[in-house]
Image (cartoon, coloured by chain):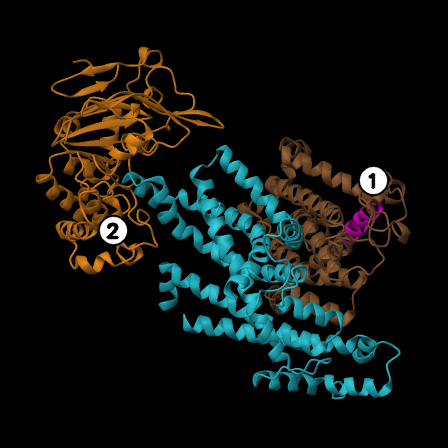
Amino acid sequence: MSGALAVRDLSVRYETAQGAVHALRHVDIEASPGEVVGIVGESGCGKSTLVTALANLLPANARADGAILYDGVDLAGLDARRQRMLRGDEIALIGQDPMTAFNPVLTIGDQLVDFQHHRRDLGRAEKRARIVAMLGRVGISDAERRMKSYPHELSGGMRQRVAIAAALLTDPGLLIADEPTTALDVTMEAQIIHLLRELRRDYNGIVIVVSHHLGVIAELCDRVYVMYAGEVVEGGDVDAIFHGARHPYTRALLACDPAGFPDRLERLPTIPGSLPSLTVPPTGCVYAPRCERAFAPCGLAEPRPVPLSGSHMARCHAVSA
Amino acid sequence: MLAYAVKRIGLGLLILVFVMVVMYAAVFLVPGDPATVALGPRATPELKKLLIERMGLDQPVWWQIVEFFRNALTGNLGYDVWSNRPVSTLVIEALPNTLILGLASLLTALAIGVPLGCLSVMRRGTLADGVIGVLAVSVIAVPSFVVAIYSLLVFAVTLRWLPAIGAGEAGNMASQFKALILPALAIALGWVGYIARMVRASMMEVMGEPHIRTARSFGLPEWKIVSKYALRIAIIPTISLVAVGLGSILSSAVFVEAVFSRPGIGKLITDAVSTRNYPVVMGTVLIMTTIYISITIAADLLIARLDPRVRDVFRG
Amino acid sequence: MSSVAEASLSTPARRRLPMLGALLADPFTCVAIVLVAGFLVTAAFAPWIAPYSPLKIDVLHKLQPPSAAHWFGTDHLGRDLLSRVIYGARTALTIAIVSVAIAGAIGLLLGLIAGYGPRWLDAMLVLTFDSLNSLPMIMFALAIITVLGAGTGTLIVVIAATSFPSYARLIRAQTLALKNSDYILAERLIDASAARIIFIHLLPNVVGPLIILLSMDIPVVIMVEAGLSFLGLGVRPPTPSWGSILYDGYTSIRSAPFMVVFGGLPLVLATLGFTFLGEGLRDYLDPRLQLRRPS
């Protein structure tokens, strides 16, 4: 089974002792099978909360409103048991930090067998055979021996390959990669991106790649959503965003990407100001306090999404189709 | 790993020597010679002389200490002042009863305490968690020998379900098992609470680690996450704390053996203390301290085995 | 480093004011406070509360079950059990408080010396603490009793000797952490005397955690006193002690079971009360401190 994903007006807030933290506000996201969709934004923009919500792993103090429709079913409306049955079957997650993603006192093989929990039709030997095959596919030689290893005996890059193998083993319709290369060094990052690009070819579910790294998104994704302070501010095809960004925040973000500079600079450009409080969200546009193009309506009314060409849209008062 | 073990064992031996030297020194620092104290003021000089010879008190202190260790190395711990039986025989006769009691208590406590701790974690924040927490503190607080006396009153004296005294007939497994139940439960009760709390506390820490989220993201059921993914890590600090606490199982055993007149080490040494039977006290203290230190070292090595990360640190 | 030390220093001081309120918010701590206060009052005013002398023998009325004249009954010598239990509270609490105070003082002194003194002395003291800690306490205790003979004084020595090492270790760790903090370094720069640093700066800061540890050990000490007295190795008869009442009851458990019931009850209530009070203090002041072990 592989269906389309539609996030509709999703808001998530965390109830804390210091008051409610509005981590996500009115987020709309679409993705269809075979598509790789990127989510990009700086730390604290709500990427992680979005991933957690998609994977049904929100902590107990989180309150979610809106809908996450997967194959026509609202995931948020399911009971805990049905949600759990989807995790590791229809929905798989590749974690942020391969160093801590695996249990340190169980062997890789043992954990990968457990992760195929939902495949009741397979025996232990069959599960192990699938693991060997899958480890080979993600480029781990000597798979039999690696299965007997403990996580700390593998390098970071190898562990991330194992994490990818683990996710693919469950044959998910929705694969979420949460900062898949952030914890890796540059060489490893290139290898993992190469691997993910290769694997895309014979995978026909949805892939969501979350990253703060514009290069990773540009290399891997078909479409991309840009997030800021818990909101999606712009979305569209990768080309449209990287070459024809309309939202001032996206433009500023692209201007700050060190990869875009041919030479070494004296100092990296930055966006002045800092993220608004998520406890008391500003009225009007969330980016207005830092926006160089802000004018009268920005501080008063929340901008509505402005449809542009194709799937391109931007939430900005200064943008018109 | 080997170097570590050697260092631990060396330190253990040092502590043993230190303890025995201090004990011998203490005997001689205290006014009044031990023979007079043991026999009372009206003993005949001949009897006193005999006792002094038996205790080896006519030799210089340092010589006594050297003799003690030299004999101990050959398995001779001296002789009971009153019955003149070898102390080593007395200890060997009593030791199994105490070891079985300690082991049975610990296993019972683990068998009940670990699942309770897990249940507490799975139902964290609920009424069940709260009730387990309060019960745990309560059973830790109540002294084991009071539990022993009350259980003796209820199950042995009033209901007559189980024997009140002894360790059961020799060679009769069923009778020995019956005699073990009440003493073992009396000691285990407090440990159930302690282990449940320890497991809960260290499990709550582990449950926040990213690999648990990974296991969750693959849809593993909560019981499996708790019992396999979290417990395997959480049990490691629990084991070391239980090992450190073995000394208090031993002290519980001393009191509980007295309540049930169970012929173990506790009974041997308390009888010896009240009759000032120095060789028996010294020999028993030496043996029990050796066992206790060995168990602590063994527990440390076991932890190294259980945690592959620690294991590699020792290997490399 | 310094920020950690500052944080751990400022926390108790800042939270000290609403302490009683915070403790009273937990129902179990409330009950514990009532129990502990009850035992303290009983111990302090034993002669006025007890209906009879705890030592008055009346063999004609021995082993009498509870009645209007003797609420808890009488023991094998016809002594009033309620009066013995009330005086037993006095024995238990006196020994507990005195021995824990002595152990605390020794621990404080040695811990400060180890933490503040020269390195070689520190190494020696730490080895001593660790050696004593790695002994099975009961064996150590019984060895001391063999040498000194049973009695109240011995009991206090036993408890102080077996418990001071853990206090000394705590104080040493706290002292070491504080010694390197910025404000102590500043004091040293202006040539403050060691005495000034120890008494004005170190002492007030290390005493708090020590008091929690001491309060958590009180129920253990009460239990040790009762247990050793039960074995006949603690308080000498005829001094009333909960442990010896339990022993007297134990020897006539078939004919007068009420004796062990009433002898054990105050012991259970006292250890519960002090344990829950210690738990409350610990949760409030420093939840990271180790949990109490069973006894």
Is A276 or A105 nearer to us in this picture?
A105
Q: CA distance from mark 1 to mark 2?
A: 76 Å
Mark 1 belongs to which amino acid?
A: Ser
Chain C colour is brown
Q: Which chain is cyan?
A: B
**Residue C89 in magenta stretch:** yes
Is residue C125 among what the camera can see? no
Image position, residue C286 (x, y; %):
59, 44
- Residue B119 against residue B265 in the figure, above or below: above
Indicate the quadrant where residue B52 lies. bottom right
Is A29 or B13 nearer to us in this picture?
B13
Chain identity of mark 1: C
* Dot in front, 1 or 2: 1
Q: Quadrant of the C terminus of chain A?
A: top left
Indicate the quadrant where residue B288 lies. bottom right
Q: Residues within 10 Å of mark 1 (few under 14, many from 20)?
A: few
Quick check: A8 left or right of B237? Answer: left
Marks 2 and 1: in contact by CB < 8 Å?
Answer: no
Quick check: C136 left or right of C100? Answer: left
Indicate the quadrant where residue B304 lies. bottom left
Image position, residue A8 (x, y; %):
25, 20
Residue at figure coordinates x 62%, y 33% from the top left: C26
Is B143 or C112 nearer to us in this picture?
B143
Q: Secondary structure at mark 1?
A: loop
The secondary structure that most of the magenta stretch takes on is helix
Image position, residue A143 (x, y; %):
17, 57
Quick check: A1 left or right of A232? Answer: left
Is residue A19 among what the camera can see? yes
Numbered range of the magenta stretch = C83-95
- Quickly name the residue at label 1: C67
